[in-house]
Image (tube, coloured by chain):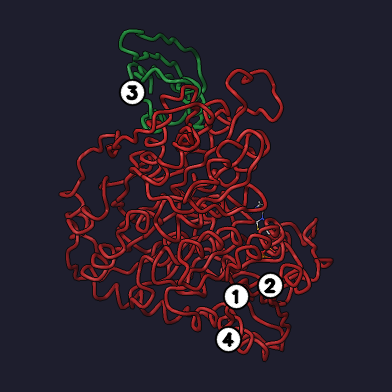
Chain colours: A green, B red
Amino acid sequence: MNRYQLAIQVDDKQVVLERILQVTRYRGFLIDGINAKVNTGTHIGYIELFVRSDRPIELLVDQINKLIDIKDVKVTHNTA
Amino acid sequence: MASEKQHTGSSLLFDILQQHGVQHVFGYPGGAIMPIYDALYDSDVEHFLCRHEQGAAFAAVGYARASGKIGVCFATSGPGATNLITGLADALADSIPIVAITGQVPTSAMGSDAFQEIDIFGLSLACTKHSFQVTDINDLPKVLHKAFAIALEGRQGPVLVDIPKDIQLAAVENSLEDFSQLKNKVKLPPANVGSALALLNQAKQPVLYVGGGVGMANAVDELRAFAKLAGMPSVSTLKGLGAINPEDENYLGMLGMHGTKAANLAVQQSDLLVVVGARFDDRVTGKLDEFAPHAKIIHFDIDTAEINKRRKADAAILGDLKVNLPALAIPLSINDWQLHCQQMKADFAWDYDHPGDTIFAPAVLKEVSDKMPENTCITTDVGQHQMWAAQHMSFNDPSNFLTSGGMGTMGFGLPAAIGAQISRPNDCVITVTGDGSFMMNVQELSTIKRFQIPVKIVLIDNGKLGMVRQWQDLFFEGRLSETDLSDNPDFVMLAGAFNIKAKEITTKDQVSAAIEEMIDHDGPYLLQVKIDAQDNVWPLVPPNTANDQMMEKT
Ligand SMILES: Cc1ncc(C[n+]2csc(CCOP(=O)(O)OP(=O)(O)O)c2C)c(N)n1
C-alpha cells in the first residue's frame, strides 16, 4: 500500500471533520493519523491527514475537494 | 388592536421558498415539524401530503426531473427523517436537485436521546451532496439560500436542512434579503480542447457515449448539433435516454448490461469514445478492463472527480456542456464506420415475435410508446419492466424518462410520477411498474386519490420479482429463492379501493384497445398486463464480462 500525507484547509464548520473522515473511509483509504486545529481568529481549520491505500491519491483529493467547506487540499507526501 | 402575526423561523422558511420560486412541496407532518406545518396553513405554497416520507422524497425527485426545477420535501424528526433517506440516496446517485427540510427536537433537547430524536445530520453525510443543521435563527436565511444554490450548482444533488423546533418558533424580523448565486467553488482546470480536436480528427471509428449529464446541463440541443455535425454513431446510458434524437440514423440505442447488440459492439470496436456527462458505471462498462479496449477517451463532465475515476481520459473537457460541446463540434469523415454501425443496427433490430397468445411486454411498451401523446413523461420502477421500457420506448427528451438509474430503487415509479404530473399538469404521465416494485410505495395511490392526479399505471405483472428470478435461473441453477409473488393482491380491486379505474388484460388481442382506453381516460388509470413469468430481458451481458460477450434469446 502507498502512504500519503494530505494538508487540508477548511472553513471551520460543524461536521467538516466527520465529512472528511467519511469520504476517506468510503473511498478506500485507511487512516494512519490525523492532526487538526482551528485558527479562531480567521475561522480556518488546518487538517493533516495520513492515509494508506492501493488506490491513487487523486481519487481521494478530488472527492475531498468536492466537499462544500473545503478551501484547499494538497498532497504533501507520497510514497507511490 | 389586532397585531400582525409575528414572523417566525417557520414563516421565514416559506418566504424564502417563494423567493426561490417554489410553488409545490411534498411532505408528511409530525411533532418536531409542527410549527412549519402551522406556517404552511397561511402560506401560498401548495403542499401535497404523501403517505410515506419516502413517497414525498420520490415525488420531489420526480418533480425536479420532469421540470428542471428544484424539488422540495418535508419530514418530521426521527422516523420521518429516516424515511427520507432512500429518496436522498436516489437523488445523490442520479444527481437530482432536491431540498429536504426536516424538523428536529428543540436545541435544548438535542443530544439527550429525546423522543423522536435521531442524528439525521450525521446520517445525511453519506446520502446528500451537502447538509445543514440550523442552531441559530440568524443563520436560517443564509443556510436556506445556500441549500438552494448548492443543490443546483455544478453537479446537482440533494441538500438536507435540519431545523430544530425552537428555531422554527423563534421570532425574526421579516426583512427578506437578496440572495446572490453561489459560484462553483471548485475551479475547473482548463478544457483540453486542443488534444480533443486532434483525437477527433484522427479517429476512424468514434462513438458518442451520452449520459444523464446532458439533460442535467440542459444541453440537449448542443449535443444533438454536435452529433449531427460529426455524424458520429451514438449510444446512451439509461439516464441519458432522450438526449439523442431517437430518430437519428446513427443512434444505436442503450449500451451496457441490457444494451442493444449494435450499441455494445460499436463501443467495443471504437477507436475513440466521446463521453458526455457519463461516468463509466459498472452496469455500462461490464468488465472494465475489457471495455472499449481500443478506444481513446474524450471525457466531458462538470465533476472533476469523475475524470480518471474508472477510466483514464486522454482529453478532459471540464465545465458547462452548453459551452464546451459547440467548441468541439466539427464534421468528420467516417462514412464507412457510419455505414458499418447502421448495418449492425439493422441486423440486430428488435424482434417482437412472441409465439402464442400470452402478452409480450416489449411489444406492449413499444405500442404504449407509439400511441402516447407527444411529450409524455414516463417513469419506471426497477427490474425487467424497467429494462424493457428503456429498450422499447422512445423519448424525445431526458426529462420524459424518469428512472432510478444509479440507485436502482424499487418503489420509485409511482411517487415520481405523482411529482412529475404535478410539475407538468398538461402532459400525460405514465408509470411503468412491476408487481413487486408497485407494492413498495403502493400507499401513494392515496395521494393520487386525494388530488385526483391523472397518472396512468402500466403494471407489468409476471407474479415474480422478475429480474431476480431471471438471475436465479441463469446464474443460480434455477434455485428460485423468495422471488415468487403468485399470491399478489387483486390489483384491479386494489385500484378500485382508491377510486382508480383499472383493467386486467391477459391475451395479445386485448392489448391495443386497452392501451387506447388508458390513454384516453381522463383521470388516473391502472392497466394490469399479465405476462409469462418465464420471459427474460435480452440481451444480457453477464456480470464481470466484456460487453461483446452478451447472452441472447435462445
Ligand atoms: C428497494 C429495492 N429492493 C430490492 C431490489 C432488488 N431488485 C431488483 S429488481 C427486483 C425485482 C423487481 O420485481 P418487479 O418490480 O416485479 O419487476 P420485474 O423485474 O418483475 O419486472 C428486485 C427485488 C431493488 N432494486 N430495490
Of badges 3 and 4, nearer the viewer stands: 4
The residue labelled by disc 1 is B523
Q: Up-down: is B331 above or below B545? A: below
Residue B500 tag number: 2
Crowd tier of the residue under label 3, counting other residues whose Cα lies within 10 Å: few below 14, some 14–19, many 20 or above: some
> Which residue is painted at 17% across and 64% down in the image?
B330
Q: What separation in Å lies between label 2 and label 3 (alpha carbons)?
A: 56 Å
For the residues tagged 4 and 1, is the chain the same?
Answer: yes
Question: To which chain does the residue with label 4 belong?
Answer: B
Mark 3: amino acid: Val
Quarter of the image where ligand 1 sits: bottom right
Residue A73 tag number: 3
> Which residue is painted at 45% across and 34% down in the image?
B130
> Which residue is painted at 57% across and 41% down in the image?
B38
Q: In the picture provided, is B201 more to the left or to the right than A42?
A: left
Image spot of residue B146 (x, y percent) = 37, 35
The residue labelled by disc 4 is B516
Image spot of residue B553 (x, y percent) = 61, 74
Q: What separation in Å lies between label 3 and label 1 (alpha carbons)?
A: 55 Å
Spot the residue most to the right: B487
Of residues B417 and B478, the one nearer the viewer is B417
Of residues B66 and B222, the one nearer the viewer is B66
Q: In the picture provided, is B251 more to the left or to the right than B32?
A: left
Q: Are marks 2 and 1 in contact (CB under 8 Å)?
A: yes
Residue B423 tag number: none
Q: What separation in Å lies between label 2 and label 1 (alpha carbons)?
A: 8 Å
Question: To which chain does the residue with label 1 belong?
Answer: B
Image spot of residue B155 (x, y percent) = 37, 44
